[in-house]
């Protein structure tokens, strides 16, 4: 079961990857929020951060960290973000918070991706968590039919519009034995913006937090 103490422990353990003077890419979600709150203490040591969502941009501003545009910063040394599932290869499912596209962009633009999660997110095989897919609205039904052909069971996420103005299909019952191949196959469907598999660009480091405040680090 996930716990706030476990998320906070993982988030605070990620502070050691922050270098004075370096820009940081920031993810989205409750664990990323704990990281933003912890990063506030270092606000005078960093020039700013590139957020992966409007929500994270607002939280960064609220704690006094400058929000920067990826088009002006260029490559980032570090990206810190949560996940919905993580396997031993540090492949992830992300997008429970509907920010997967911007998260994938900022992760792709970053040299090091440190994933922070409570220990409930650690799995042997990805796919118990429904795989989010961001879709151009007019392509919703077509993409859903194509996802069924790939073996999934897509469900429209009611009332969810992404920061990019698109919709989310959550795909249930996918047997994700080859995450890289499935990530590429879904992204080939016209109308798909991207999907929540982070396998082509996995995390480099995974910090798992436990409810007692301890952490484990994989991939360091
Ligand atoms: C948002 C995400 C989040 O990283 C993911 O949903 C985990 O969220 P939380 O830290 O709240 O458990 O991918 O799109």
Image (tube, rainbow, N blue to C red):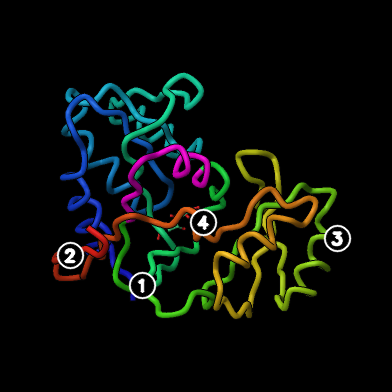
On the image, the x and y values in percent for residue 59 come to: 37, 35
Q: Residue at x 49, y 45 (%)?
A: 103
Image depth: mark 3 or mark 4 in front: 4
Q: Residue at x 17, y 28 (%)?
A: 20
Q: Which residue is mark 4?
A: 200
Among numbered discs 2 and 4, the one appearing first in the sequence? 4
- Assign the C terminus to one quadrant of the image: bottom left
- Asked where in the image residue 189 lies, by quadrant, the reply is bottom right
Among numbered discs 3 and 1, the one appearing first in the sequence? 1
Marks 2 and 1 in Cβ contact (< 8 Å): no
Q: Which residue is mark 3?
A: 142
Calculate the distance from the C-alpha at mark 3 to the C-alpha at mark 2: 43 Å
> Which secondary structure lies at badge 2?
strand
* CB at disc 4 and ligand 1 closer than 8 Å: no
Q: Which residue is mark 2?
A: 215
- Asked where in the image residue 84 lies, by quadrant, the reply is bottom left
Q: Which residue is mark 1?
A: 88
Q: Residue at x 34, y 29 (%)?
A: 62
The residues colored magenta run 103-115
Q: Residue at x 53, y 56 (%)?
A: 95
Mark 2 closeness class: few <14, some 14–19, many ≥20 residues within 10 Å: many
Marks 3 and 1 in Cβ contact (< 8 Å): no
On the image, the x and y values in percent for residue 178 come to: 56, 73
**In which of the image's four quarters is ligand 1 placed?**
bottom left
On the image, the x and y values in percent for residue 93 come to: 50, 64
């Amino acid at each position: 079961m996930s716990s706030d103490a476990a998320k906070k422990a993982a988030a605070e353990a990620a502070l050691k990857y922050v270098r004075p003077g370096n820009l940081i890419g920031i993810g989205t979600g409750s664990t990323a929020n704990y990281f933003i709150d912890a990063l506030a203490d270092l606000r005078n040591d960093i020039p700013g951060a590139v957020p992966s969502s409007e929500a994270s941009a607002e939280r960064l501003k609220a704690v006094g960290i400058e929000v920067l545009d990826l088009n002006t910063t260029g490559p980032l040394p570090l990206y810190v973000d949560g996940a919905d599932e993580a396997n031993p290869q540090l492949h992830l499912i992300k997008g429970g918070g509907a920010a997967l596209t911007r998260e994938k962009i900022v992760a792709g633009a970053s040299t090091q991706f440190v994933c922070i999660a409570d220990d409930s997110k650690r799995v042997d095989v990805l796919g118990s968590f429904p795989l989010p897919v961001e879709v151009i609205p007019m392509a919703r039904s077509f993409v859903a039919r194509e996802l069924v052909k790939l073996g999934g069971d897509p469900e429209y996420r009611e009332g969810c519009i992404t920061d990019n103005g698109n919709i989310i299909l959550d795909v249930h019952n996918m047997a994700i034995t080859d995450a890289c191949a499935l990530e590429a196959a879904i992204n080939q469907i016209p109308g798909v913006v991207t999907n929540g598999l982070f396998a082509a660009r996995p995390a480099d480091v995974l910090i798992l937090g436990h409810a007692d405040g301890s952490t484990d680090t994989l991939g360091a």
